[in-house]
Amino acid sequence: MPLKRHTALIPLSQDHHGALLLVWKIRQGLKSGIERNRLIGYIKYFAESYLEPHFQIEEGLVFSYLGKNDSMRIQAEFEHQLLRTQISNINQQVPSENLDIKKFSDTLESHIRFEERKLFQHMQAELMDKDLAEMEKAIKKVHFKFQEIWDDEFWVENK
């Protein structure tokens, strides 16, 4: 059964759907044996154009509605930093069993599942309606619908 999402959080949930598509595309590329540089280029593009702006909205705006010591907030912020580190290592092509492309896709998927199933549910239960309404207005001012512009569709068969 789909989770009921407050309208304030819907744009972020839509972003999460887009990031899950990134995970799928990476896995398709890995499964098909796509050249590492092609995957790295796409990850870099997606991280700069999509993930980082999304993280900034969450960290600078959304998470501020939770206390600094809130365990869910702490976990989300930690995972954002972990993902940034993994992206940086991938971009620098630092070979490491723990920070490779597959590990990044697994970490990103796990992080999205955490935010959707736990963090957002927690926020909806803990925050007052007026806070969620205020958050919704603030998100609308800074959120943008991402339009992907990437020609190398390595995830499509026979490309």
Image (cartoon, grey):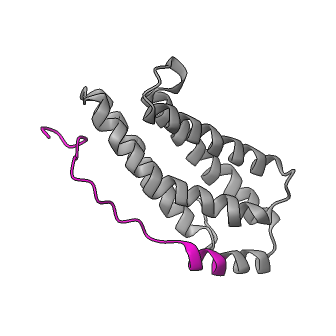
Residue 153 within the segment the image draws in magenta: yes
In the rendered structure, which segment of residues is drawn in magenta?
Answer: 136-159
Residue 20 within the segment the image draws in magenta: no
Would residue 17 be seen by someone viewing this image from the given angle? no
Q: Residue furthest left?
A: 158
Would residue 121 be seen by someone viewing this image from the given angle? yes
Where residue 4 sits: x, y (%)? Answer: 61, 65
Determine whether, in the image, residue 69 is placed left or right of residue 110. Answer: right
The N terminus lies in which quarter of the figure?
Answer: bottom right
For residue 80, what is the image quadrant?
top right
Q: Residue furthest front?
A: 92
Where residue 146 sits: x, y (%)? Answer: 41, 65
The C terminus lies in which quarter of the figure?
Answer: top left
Q: Is residue 89 above or below residue 108?
A: above
For residue 29, what is the image quadrant?
top left
Determine whether, in the image, residue 141 is placed left or right of residue 59. Answer: left
Foreground pick, 96 / 158: 96
Foreground pick, 143 / 92: 92
Number of marks present in the image shown:
0
Determine whether, in the image, residue 18 is placed left or right of residue 79. Answer: left
Q: Residue furthest top?
A: 97
Residue at the spot 75% in from the left edge and 57% down from the top edge: 122
Residue at the spot 50% in from the left edge and 19% down from the top edge: 96
Where residue 115 sits: x, y (%)? Answer: 63, 51
| Prevalent SS, magenta region | loop
Q: Is residue 12 above or below residue 128?
A: above
Where residue 89 sits: x, y (%)? Answer: 51, 31
Residue at the spot 46% in from the left edge and 20% down from the top edge: 95
Foreground pick, 38 / 15: 38
